[in-house]
Image (tube, helix red, strand yellow):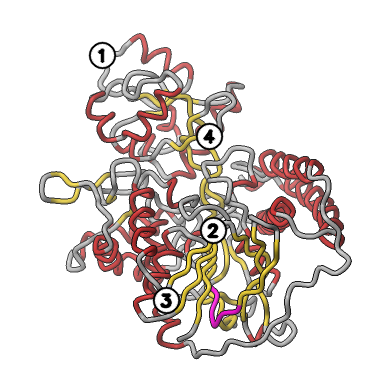
Amino acid sequence: MPRVIIIGSGIAGLFAALELSDAGYDVLVVTKQRPEDSSTNWAQGGIAAILDQTDNSGIESHITDTLACGDGQCDEEVVRVVVSEAGDRIRDLLSIGVSFEKAGEEFHFAKEGGHSTARILHAKDATGKEIESALNNEVSRRENIELRPMTLAVDLIQRKHGAIEEGICGIWCLNLDDDTMTTELADAIMIATGGAGKLWAKTTNPPVATGDGLAMAHRAGACVKDMAFVQFHPTALMITDERPFLITEALRGAGGVLLDDEGLATHLKERGDPAPLSFTLEYSTKGSLATRDIVARACDNVIKRSGADHVWLVCDHLDTEELQSSFPTITERLQRHGLILGKDPLPVAPAAHYMVGGLDVDLQGRVQTSDSTVIPGLYGIGEVACTGMHGANRLASNSLLEGVVFAQRAARHIITELPSSLSQSPDWLADGLQELLEHSPLRHDLESLQATMTDDVGLVRRFSRLKRALRRLNLLSDEVDLVWSTCRPSRDLIELRNLILVATLIAQDALQRTQNHGLHFNADLV
């Protein structure tokens, strides 16, 4: 049987592995840390879905909300495919042991920002962890799936001396346990490496989110699109000396409200009010439950005006016991900092959360070149891919859904269309390369990169700042390329090289845009 390599162990990668395993394929899943160290595992909210495929009004409502959130930039055909196939994919997840919250005998559906109704399946506030655990348990039982942790994919191997039209035949990997390079051949490569949240100083992403898959595919000739659209989650917990911790949108769906300092002071005097009025109402009639682009920019605007580093999320007008039962993960995290969910105001601020743009793929997940020609044997699924589903702004809880739908579609395409054609490829050549003895300059370069992206390519942009960012990114790229050409690869070096490339693609796309849509907001275009 053919062999498929999947890079990444989140929902998309593991679901695709199981589909291929069912067809008898040999599957190698490589992941650079533990399998559970993925963005999927950190996802709190849930997965949006209409389970009843005969519920035409529910399906159309989900489609309408997705298109509206995407600000006219979605591919409607893709949206209809994903929403229509949602029920089948949810049943697939249930069949492998995923357990979603129920109210009695029926599933409990939550509501999140941008949704006109409650349609979010969830496992309290640890949905990603529940899905990831079930997928990993099932993968571990399959003899034809090898899960290889601590393995960092470095670059794709192209057939016939780099001819794009001949496709991809394997990958070079760095074993992080002993720093050895290996060559892995395959009939198809599926990239499921997630996003690049580590580009910004504040992110809800795990540390592994360094844009590796996107960067290596772009170096191999893949086209990217919509890179300017980077989603910042409006409510990340901001505690001094702690990395941002996601406060799920479902908490606002349950009635939580965002307040500025003045609003909080008024609210504390008038605790009898059932729900305080949020500053977000100045930006949308939906207030704290507007789409993430609107709420995040509203928070950012208040923070910049006040000079504070956060706004406040308040829930003390809600039932404390019910909140803590519904959100145990958040409750436990807050207790570490002496905060009580349902009583204390929570300091929150926007943080980089999701890369809406990515590798240009078709409806089968096949990665394309700039002239829309597919690269044989190369697929992109999950956050690394830009399918057209999200347009200019992802609707809350649509990401897990898109990931599992395209994982199934890409796997089905491999099973039905891909012939077995493993070919010879060169081993990694390291003759003359030195060991990288000093890593501190790379850490300083990473800090400089994060500062540049945070200051100049964040929630609100300007042409002058984007140009400044590109000048700085070009200098960083030159420095890292010099080290790359003379030293053996290390994890720090590989990730920094990839991050700089992805940052450059984001800044370039943002600079070229002449209109504001969704997540891309240039103050010079207002």
Rendering coords of residue 395 (x, y %)? 40, 52
Q: Is residue 155 above or below residue 494?
A: below
Q: Nearer the viewer, mark 4 or mark 1?
A: 4
Residue under the image location 30 percent in, 66 percent down:
89
In screen coordinates, is 324 left or right of 439?
A: left
Q: Secondary structure at mark 1?
A: loop
The residue labelled by disc 3 is 411
Residue interval drawn in magenta: 185-189
Closest to the observer, 272 or 163: 163
- The answer to whether any part of residue 512 appears in the image is no
| Sequence-first tag of 3 and 4 | 4
Q: Is 466 contained in the magenta span?
A: no
| Sequence-first tag of 2 and 1 | 2
| Sequence-first tag of 3 and 1 | 1
The residue labelled by disc 4 is 244
Whether tag 4 and tag 1 are in contact, CB under 8 A, the answer is no
In screen coordinates, is 440 left or right of 413?
A: right
| Sequence-first tag of 2 and 3 | 2
The residue labelled by disc 1 is 272
Between the C-alphas of marks 3 and 4, the distance is 35 Å
Q: Which amino acid type is marked by label 3?
A: Ala
Q: Is residue 476 above or below residue 213?
A: above
Name the image quarter holding the C terminus: top right
Residue under the image location 39 percent in, 72 percent down:
143
| Sequence-first tag of 4 and 1 | 4
Q: Which amino acid type is marked by label 2?
A: Pro
Q: Quadrant of residue 524?
A: top right
Rendering coords of residue 393 (x, y %)? 48, 53
Q: Which amino acid type is marked by label 1?
A: Gly
Q: Nearer the viewer, mark 2 or mark 1?
A: 2
The residue labelled by disc 2 is 149
